[in-house]
Structure formats: C-alpha cells, structure tokens
C-alpha cells in the first residue's frame, strides 16, 4: 500500500462523469504530476484529495488512514492555487503563520517556523509586506511557504505557475522541486504543460476525459507512450502512415519503401498503421545506423538557438525534425530537395 | 454650448439642495432679535431630553449595526459561496424594506409580538428595544447587504475559503479572520449608513413608544420655532460626519488601497 492511495475514484457532476475509475498510489516523498488538456478532470481529482469535493464513489487514504469522509480542514494537506490566494488583509508573515495559529502553535515556535519558511523560499526580508506589494512570483512563493508551514502530509499544487510569465515559471518550478526534495514531502502537481510535467516529476499521470491513460516516469511516457493520445499530447510527434506487409516480423511499407520494425505488429496484412517518430529521432540527410531513408522537401526552418527545428514534406505529410546548431553548417534553404533518415527501431507503432 | 447647459443644470441642482439648507441654517441662527447667535443650539444642547434620546438612539444604532453585521456578512458570504443561483432572490428580499413602509412593518410587529401573543416582546422595555433593533436592522438591510456584497466581490471568496480550509480553519475562523477583515471597509460604510438611518428614524420608535431621537425632533418641531432648524442642522452634521468617516476609513485602510 502506497503512502497516498486513490482507489477507483469517480466523480459525477449532474450527468457529467468527470473522473472515471481513477486509481493511483503515490509513495512517500514522491512528486507526481497530473498532466492533461483543460477539462480532463485534473483539478477535480486534486480537489477530491484536498477534501473540497466528495467522490461519488471510491476511496482516498493517506498513510494507511481512510480520509474519504474527512473534511478539508481535518486532512492536514497543503494546497497551492493558480490564483495565489494569499489573504489580502494579512502581512506575508501572518499569511505563513495562519495555519500554525489555527493549530494553536505557541507564539515563539510560530515565529521561528515563519522565519524558517521565509528563508526556505528565499524571501526572509519580506515578512512585513502585504501581498499586493509583491510580484506574482513572490506571492506564489509565499503561498508555498504558507502551505508548507504546518507540515502537511501531502502537498497539492493546481497549476501554480500558469499565471506567471515564462522566465519566472521555469525558475520557480525548479525552486518548488528543490524545496519538495529537501522536505521530502509527497506532492501532486497539476499542469496542462507537458514540458513542465516532464522536467520536474518523478512520475506523470497522463489524463484524458477523466481517465488515467498512462502512469509512468517522464522517460517512459515520452519514449513508450501506450496510447495514441499520450503519444500526441506528450512532446511533438510525427505521424507516418504505413501499410502492413508481414505482421509477425514487423515488416511495413512507407510510401512503397519496405522497412523492418524489428518487432511484431498487431494488425492484419494490408492494414494501415501509424508510425510515430519524435523529432529528435529523425535526421536530415543520411546517417549511420538510420537505415530508413525517405525523399523530402524542406518546408520550414525555425532557428531556436541551440536547436534548429526543420519541417519537411515527406510521403504526403509534414514531419518536424530537430538538429543541433553547428556554426559551420547553416540551415538548408526552403524548398530544397533532401532526404530524411531514421532508425526503424525508433518508430512507435500506434494502433488505429 | 453643451458645457454651458451642463454647468447651468449643475448650478440649478446645487441651488435646489443648498438654498433650503442655507435658509434653515440662517433661520436657526436668528433666535436673538437683530443679530446672529447660537442661542437656539445652546437651548437644544441644554435640553436633557436631547442627550437622553440621542444616546438612546446611538445605543440602538450600535445594537442594530452589530446585529446587522452578524446577519448580513455570513449570509452574503454563504450566498456567494454556495448558492450563487439564489442571489437574485436574496437581493429582492433585501430590497423589500425600501418598498414596504416602516409603518406596515411596525404594525406587523405589534400584531405578532403584543402582550397577549406567544412572544410578548412589547410587554417590557427591553423586549420593545429588541423589537425596535430588529426593525431598524430591516430598514438598514438594503444598504448593509449591498455594501457587504460589493465588498465580497473584490475578493476571491471561494479560493480564499479553500486556502483557509486546507490550512485547518473552520467556518468561524474563516469568517472572523479572513472574510470580515477583507470586507471591513464595506461593513463600516454600511454601518455609518445604518447609524444615519437609525438616528433620524421616527415611525417605528414613535409607534413602539420608545424615547428615540426621531420622535424628540418631531416633538420639538411641533412646539418651538428656532430650535427645530438648529436640531436639523445638527442632524445634518451627524449624517455628513458619518459620510466623512466612510471616506476616511476607505482612505486609511492599508491593504484596501491596493485594490483601488
Ligand atoms: N463544480 C462543478 N460542477 C459541475 N461541473 C464541474 C464542476 N467542476 C468541474 N466541472 C466539470 O468537470 C470537468 C473537469 O473539470 P476540471 O477538473 O476542472 O478539469 P481540469 O482541471 O483538468 O481543467 C469540466 O468539464 C468541468 O466543466
Ligand atoms: Mg484545472
């Protein structure tokens, strides 16, 4: 049994089944992200864990204790919201002290803890400020300190970074992860940003339509997506249509050209399957170890700095591929004929 | 041309309000023949009934404000949080006192709570005071509710509530430590409006036969010449003082400044 256990959670609003048979076990100290498009039920799962929504069925237990029927204020769970939600009438220090005050922690101990928390988030000087005197990033850090001050058993974060601008978003997510590691607190992080989820999570739960489609480490999710949805939602994916020649040996043809996938395909001869390829699996031109070569035309070149993303027209579709920038190799001109190559083993076969 | 018309209308409006006031003030200063003096004011302040009725009304105003805040803040909060679809109904109810004359309300009270009823509130002075407080709270309800509801609109009630709950706070703590302080300015402006209403109210106090400031003003007005306008000027001063206080509170509230 895991530290935080969600068992067969269901939530129905009226006739709308928002969360369907959702089960997840989270180990102590683990950082798990719920990733999915807007409206897929991430917030609802989080709110059930927090105690703001009652599951229609299913159970939640923390550290072996069933908390399904506990009220939100009895669960000892820290929460961080997208909208900061600092108490506007209190100073930063009073905000951080709030949970301790409610618990009846004596004044001296409270003050020490507040100081410790403000140091943890790197804002030891700002205790006497009011929330409106802080930037968005500072407010969200105070919100983190406030949530952590009463030593909650679980930390829940609902898209805490989406209201911030890009630079702050990246630095704060690393800061949150560092603090989480330092305290070893079990954390669920909700986001619709796959890059965010992949960069900081121990494990990711990819959600779609209220269902957990795949649970796994970022590396696993990215490289071995179980479903077409996961493959498409996590990272950029190029899709090529292939015709099955021999299912048992995994031989298919793309644009008339045969290629051996090296693993059996679960489809009949003559059926079409989709081959999915990550941009980094494709090379411009021929390369050693990439035995599949297809003719292509350069359609678009995006110079991103260290990486150059090229879009090429191949076999009736457009594929995106990444090459590293090299000062001695300028990007190819638009419309120039070229070739792309990839290793058949890198292709992910998606059932239709 | 348009500007000229606008200014003329504004001037006319000012005159419409100011002339009676100026006339009244001037008249209140003319008690002594041939010269201006504050004799009328002195007379009013010397009258022990002035102080008795004024402090009585002030006490009742305080009670009304406390009761009103305790009634309106949790109600408006709860409606915003849990019953947003009921807001039009609640708003309609809070507007009713503006439509139903005070005399109807007070006669209803007397019918329901007379000495031979199940709850004979009118049988004792304290009971009648309680009744009067309830009546005042009803009269002040439209202003109080609107003020508090507007105050609640400036904060994210739902998220702040959930943030507090996740930190272990119960309903009382949430209301007392978070909701009330954040709508304090709104509550105070509602409170000063309530004060102004209660100080000047006549019908309810007269019909329940309590020694309030309103009936005293009326009594004085019926029997004297110079004191009533002096009293009216004092009443105006109190009202304007209240409005000034609303402004001051708004100006000096620390965290409220951020929202403006
Ligand atoms: N209180 C509610 N009442 C009715 N429907 C709701 C409620 N909360 C959420 N929903 C619906 O549930 C679905 C999932 O919402 P949510 O969990 O917020 O998604 P996400 O956080 O993944 O964007 C949405 O279609 C939303 O409209
Ligand atoms: Mg959400």
Image: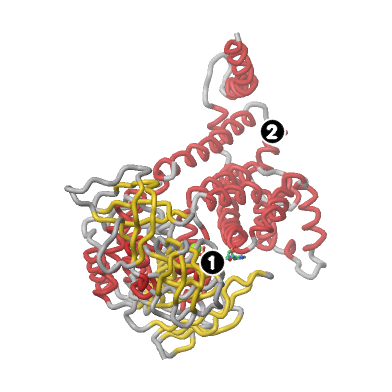
- Left or right, A92 with respect to A81, comes to left
Residue B169 at least partly seen: no
Measured Cα–Cα span from mark 2 to mark 1:
71 Å
Q: Quadrant of ligand 1?
A: bottom right
Question: Which residue in the rendered view is the most extreme toward the top?
Answer: B1
* Residue B143 position (above or below residue A323): above
Residue B169 on image: x %, y %: 45, 71
In percent of width and height, residue A187 lies at 37, 74
Closest to the observer: A71 or B237? A71
Residue in the image at 21% along x and 56% along y: A125
Render colour scheme:
secondary structure
Mark 2 and ligand 1: say if the CB distance to the nearest ligand atom is below 8 Å: no
Q: Which residue is mark 2?
A: B221
Q: Position of residue B62 (x, y in %)?
A: 55, 53
**Which residue position holds label 1?**
A40
Q: Residue A151 placed where, x, y %?
A: 33, 76
| Mark 1 CB near ligand 1 (8 Å cut) | yes
Q: Horizontal placement of B14 versus A349: left or right? A: right
What residue appears at the point 38 percent right and 46 percent down from the top-left corner? Answer: A300
Residue found at x 67% / y 44%: B201
Q: Chain of mark 2?
A: B
Q: How crowded is the residue under tag 1: few (<14 C-alpha within 10 Å), some, or many (20+)?
A: many
Tell me the mark number nearer the camera, choosing from 2 and 1. 1
Which residue appears at 34% of the width and 46% of the height? Answer: A301
Secondary structure beneath dot 2 equals: helix
- Residue B105's place in the image compared with A16, above or below, is above
């Amino acid at each position: 049994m895991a530290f935080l256990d969600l068992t067969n959670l269901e939530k129905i609003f009226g006739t709308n089944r928002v969360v369907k048979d959702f089960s997840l076990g989270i180990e102590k100290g683990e950082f798990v992200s719920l990733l999915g498009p807007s409206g897929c039920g991430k917030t609802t799962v989080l709110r059930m864990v927090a105690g703001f929504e009652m599951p229609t069925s299913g159970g939640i237990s923390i550290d072996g204790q069933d908390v399904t029927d506990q009220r939100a204020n009895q669960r000892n769970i820290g929460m961080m919201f997208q909208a900061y939600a600092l108490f506007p009438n209190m100073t930063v220090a009073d905000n951080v002290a709030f949970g301790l005050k409610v618990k009846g922690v004596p004044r001296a101990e409270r003050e020490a803890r507040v100081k410790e928390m403000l140091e943890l988030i790197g804002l030891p000087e700002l205790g006497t400020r009011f929330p409106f005197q802080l930037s968005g990033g500072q407010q969200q850090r105070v919100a983190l300190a406030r949530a952590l001050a009463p030593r909650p058993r679980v930390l829940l974060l609902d898209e805490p970074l989406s209201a911030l601008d890009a630079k702050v978003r990246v630095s704060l997510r690393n800061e949150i992860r560092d603090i989480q590691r330092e305290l070893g607190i079990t954390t669920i992080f909700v986001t619709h940003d796959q890059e965010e989820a992949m960069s900081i999570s121990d494990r990711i739960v990819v959600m779609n339509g209220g269902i957990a489609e795949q649970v796994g480490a970022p590396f696993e999710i990215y490289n071995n997506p179980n479903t077409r949805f996961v493959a498409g939602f996590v990272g950029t994916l190029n899709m090529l249509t292939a015709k099955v020649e021999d299912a048992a040996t995994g031989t298919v043809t793309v644009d008339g050209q045969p290629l051996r996938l090296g693993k059996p395909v679960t489809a009949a001869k003559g059926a079409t399957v989709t081959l999915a390829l990550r941009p980094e699996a494709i090379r411009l031109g021929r390369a050693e170890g990439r035995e599949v070569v297809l003719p292509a035309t350069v359609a678009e070149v995006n110079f991103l700095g260290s990486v150059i993303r090229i879009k090429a027209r191949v076999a009736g579709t457009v594929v995106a591929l990444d090459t590293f920038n090299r000062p001695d190799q300028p990007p190819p001109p638009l419309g120039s004929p070229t070739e792309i190559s990839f290793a058949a083993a890198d292709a992910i076969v998606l059932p239709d | 041309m348009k500007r000229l018309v606008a200014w003329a209308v504004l001037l006319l409006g000012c005159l419409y309000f100011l002339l009676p006031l100026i006339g009244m003030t001037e008249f209140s200063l003319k008690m002594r023949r041939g010269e201006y003096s504050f004799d009328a004011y002195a007379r009013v302040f010397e009258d022990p009934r002035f102080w008795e009725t004024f402090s009585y009304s002030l006490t009742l105003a305080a009670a009304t404000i406390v009761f009103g805040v305790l009634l309106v803040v949790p109600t408006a909060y709860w409606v915003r949080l849990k019953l947003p679809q009921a807001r039009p109904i609640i708003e309609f109810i809070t507007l009713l006192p503006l439509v139903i004359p005070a005399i109807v309300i007070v006669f209803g009270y007397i019918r329901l709570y007379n000495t031979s009823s199940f709850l004979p509130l009118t049988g004792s002075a304290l009971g009648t005071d309680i009744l009067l407080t309830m009546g005042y709270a009803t009269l002040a309800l439209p202003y109080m509710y609107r003020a508090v509801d507007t105050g609640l609109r400036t904060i994210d009630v739902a998220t702040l509530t959930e943030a507090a709950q996740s930190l272990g706070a119960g309903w009382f703590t949430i209301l007392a430590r978070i909701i009330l302080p954040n709508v304090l300015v709104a509550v105070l402006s509602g409170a000063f409006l309530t004060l102004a209403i209660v100080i000047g109210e006549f019908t309810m106090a007269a019909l329940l036969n309590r020694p309030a400031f309103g009936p005293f003003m009326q009594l004085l007005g019926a029997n004297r010449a110079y004191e009533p306008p002096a009293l009216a000027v004092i009443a105006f001063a109190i009202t304007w003082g209240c409005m000034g206080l609303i402004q001051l509170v708004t100006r000096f509230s620390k965290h409220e400044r951020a929202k403006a």
